[in-house]
Image (tube, rainbow, N blue to C red):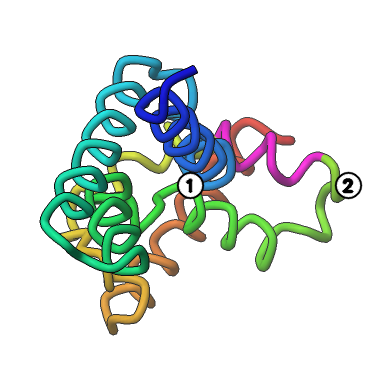
Amino acid sequence: MSQAQNDLSYFSLRLQELLNTSFPEKATDQKFIEQRSALAASAYEDAFRSGFSIPECNEIANKALFESLHFSKFDAVFQVVCNEFDSQMADEDLRPFAIKMLSVCAPVFTGYELTDDFAYSYEYDQLYTELTGTIAIWIEHHGL
């Protein structure tokens, strides 16, 4: 296996781990994973050839690999489910329920500009409240 293939595999695995954890809606998008991994490997190689240090090369590659993947809609929904509805279901049901609620809550996210640092903004509290209400209404109409 060539160094380029090793790098690509490394970046693919790192990206896949993040997607499985925080972006389940993208976790099976092989084209996205391949494109991002190739972009990160190329960015790393270009930085290395330009004389950057290994830590700097890693930082440059990570920017390419994780671009626009800092705020997770799923993580926001999962946090609401865990904090507000955990007493209504078993722990092992929280994540599957949050995955189900991601599509239910999708319209709520359209009212917000979801930047990388959105989770640290005042608007996040508003989003949290709206997500809680949306999930509560869904449970009221559909049950668990």
Q: Residue at x 27, y 41 (%)?
A: 40
| Residue 64 % position (x, y) | 22, 48
According to the image, label 2 marks what residue? 90
Q: Residue at x 79, y 40 (%)?
A: 93
Q: Quadrant of residue 31?
A: top left
Disc 2 residue type (three-letter): Ala
Q: Quadrant of the C terminus?
A: top right
SS for callout 2: loop
- Earlier in the chain: of badge 2 and badge 1, it is 1
| On screen, residue 121 above or below 22 | below
In this rendering, the label closer to the viewer, 2 or 1 = 1
Marks 2 and 1 sit apart, C-alpha to C-alpha, by 19 Å
Q: Is 26 or 57 nearer to us in this picture?
A: 57
Residue 127, picture quadrant:
bottom left
Local packing at callout 1 (Cα closer than 10 Å; few below 14, some 14-19, many 20+) is many
Q: Residue furthest left?
A: 50
Foreground pick, 138 / 76: 76
The tag on residue 74 is 1
Residue 52 horizontal/vertical position (percent): 20, 65
Amino acid type of the residue tagged 1 in the rendering: Phe
State the count of labels. 2
Where does the magenta region start and end? 93-100
Residue sitting farthest toward the right: 90
